[in-house]
Amino acid sequence: MGSREALAHLAACFDAIYRVLGEAAPTLTNDAYVVRTFESARAMGEVAVALRDFLEVEEDAPLSRVVRVLEDAVAGDATGAMVLFCFVVVVGPRLLVSLRDVREDVVLSEAELALTNLASGALVAEILAVGEVARDAEAEEDEAWQERARGLSLALDDAGYADNLGVYR
């Protein structure tokens, strides 16, 4: 896979996060999670737009499996806790591995490398910001909630995205 294809795949991942978090934020019931979801959507959208601009692609093409798992998380908890959990625990780490894989396995120009570094930095910053918001929240002890949360990870595992979001495989 060439650098253009790898960056297009990364753009699809960021587009998926941007779309679902942006659409979900105004529907959530926990004010702190609403704000954090909006902010995370904005940050992921900035990365998606930067990637699309670099690739000179006007339309977004979100990765459908990421869209589905995030939408399932939204449907599983109106407060927003589950979608933020899904973003930072299920999708985010896999996307970070994909970004690393691209940097290690694809020949990138300086501009392309800068874009992947920007994307990684934005993703890590949002993961940390969500952690700050959730830090004072009570642990979710509802077994059904926990089972649904585990199912989000399994859905990506079953789709072949156990370790990363499949950038070059």
Image (cartoon, helix red, strand yellow):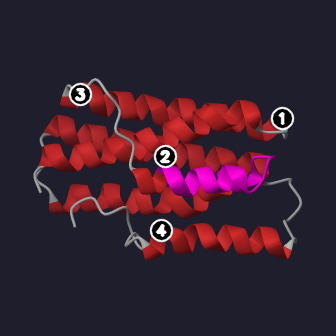
How many numbered circles does the render carry?
4
Question: Which label number is shown at residue 31?
Answer: 1
Q: Secondary structure at mark 2?
A: helix
Residue at the spot of label 2: 123
Q: Is tag 4's residue or tag 1's residue first in the polypeptide sequence? A: 1
State which mark lies toward you, 2 or 4. Answer: 4
Q: Residues within 10 Å of mark 3 (few under 14, many from 20)?
A: few
Q: Is tag 4's residue or tag 3's residue first in the polypeptide sequence? A: 3
Rounded to the nearest angstrom, the CA distance separating label 2 from label 1 is 22 Å
CB within 8 Å, label 1 to label 3: no
Q: Give how far across and how far down residue 106 sits, in percent.
A: 14, 56
Rounded to the nearest angstrom, the CA distance separating label 4 from label 3 is 27 Å
Q: In the image, is 122 to the left or to the right of 71?
A: left
Q: Secondary structure at mark 1?
A: helix
Q: Name the residue located 80 percent from the left edge and 38 percent from the top edge.
A: 32
Q: Residues within 10 Å of mark 4 (few under 14, many from 20)?
A: many
State which mark lies toward you, 2 or 3. Answer: 3
For badge 2, the amino acid type reads Leu
Q: Is tag 2's residue or tag 1's residue first in the polypeptide sequence? A: 1
What is the magenta range? 67-83
Q: Residues within 10 Å of mark 1 (few under 14, many from 20)?
A: few
Q: Quadrant of the N terminus?
A: bottom left
Question: Which label number is shown at residue 57?
Answer: 3
Q: Give how far across and how far down residue 134 sits, in percent.
A: 77, 52
Q: Secondary structure at mark 4?
A: helix
| Magenta stretch secondary structure, dominant | helix
Displayed quadrant of residue 164: bottom left
- Nearer to me, 47 or 63: 63
CB within 8 Å, label 4 to label 1: no
Rounded to the nearest angstrom, the CA distance separating label 4 from label 1 is 28 Å
Q: Give how far across and how far down residue 120 sits, in percent.
A: 40, 47
